Amino acid sequence: MTPDSVYIVYSCSVSTFIGEFEQMVLLAIMQLREEAYAITVRELLEERVERSVSRGALYRTLDRLQEKSLLRYQVDAPTAERGGHARRCFQVTPEGVAALKESRAALLTLWDGLEEELSRS
């Protein structure tokens, strides 16, 4: 290394970027509170967003959000009406709330100033 060498150091905050469907799932869980089970999340999304949600896509997304530490779950006791199977009740973590806030802020920044152009389209 010579005295003329220059180092450029980039600094950035560590962010967890989340996609549109991940946002919808996290928001649905927050809406449902203590009733946030996979089936109720799916029903809420299909009803409010009018979007068909496959079970596979939902479960993959729930697993991915858990891996990112954006949600956690608690296993309820098995019941006879569920054939002896337990179910998971989901809750958004503080990291998940922070990711939602960051995503919302980024999107609002991008939307800013486009109202007139969008109203013409």
Image (cartoon, rainbow, N blue to C red):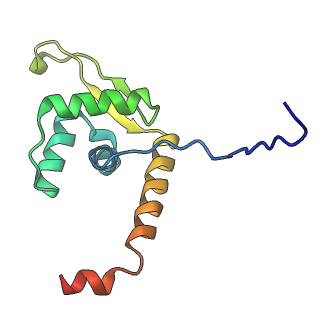
Q: Quadrant of the N terminus?
A: top right
Q: Residue at coordinates 47% horizontally, 31% vertically from top-left? A: 69
Q: Would residue 38 appear left or right of 43 to someone viewing this image?
A: right
Q: Quadrant of the C terminus?
A: bottom left
Q: Residue at coordinates 68% horizontally, 46% vertically from top-left? A: 11
Q: Where is residue 107? Give x, y as percent.
A: 40, 63
Q: Residue at coordinates 31% horizontally, 43% vertically from top-left? A: 22
Please name whichever residue, 118 or 29, is drawn nearer the observer in this view of the structure.
Answer: 118
Q: Would residue 10 appear left or right of 111 to someone viewing this image?
A: right
| 51 in relation to 79, above or below | below
Please name whichever residue, 73 or 25, is drawn nearer the observer in this view of the structure.
Answer: 25
Q: Would residue 98 appear left or right of 28 to someone viewing this image?
A: right
Q: Residue at coordinates 34% horizontally, 79% vertically from top-left? A: 114
Q: How many marks?
A: 0
Task: Place residue 63 in its image quadrant.
Answer: top left
Residue farthest right in this picture: 3
Q: Would residue 49 appear left or right of 102 to someone viewing this image?
A: left
Q: Where is residue 25? Give x, y as percent.
A: 28, 44
| 108 in relation to 5, above or below | below
Please name whichever residue, 68 or 83, is drawn nearer the observer in this view of the structure.
Answer: 68
Q: Where is residue 101? Give x, y as percent.
A: 47, 56
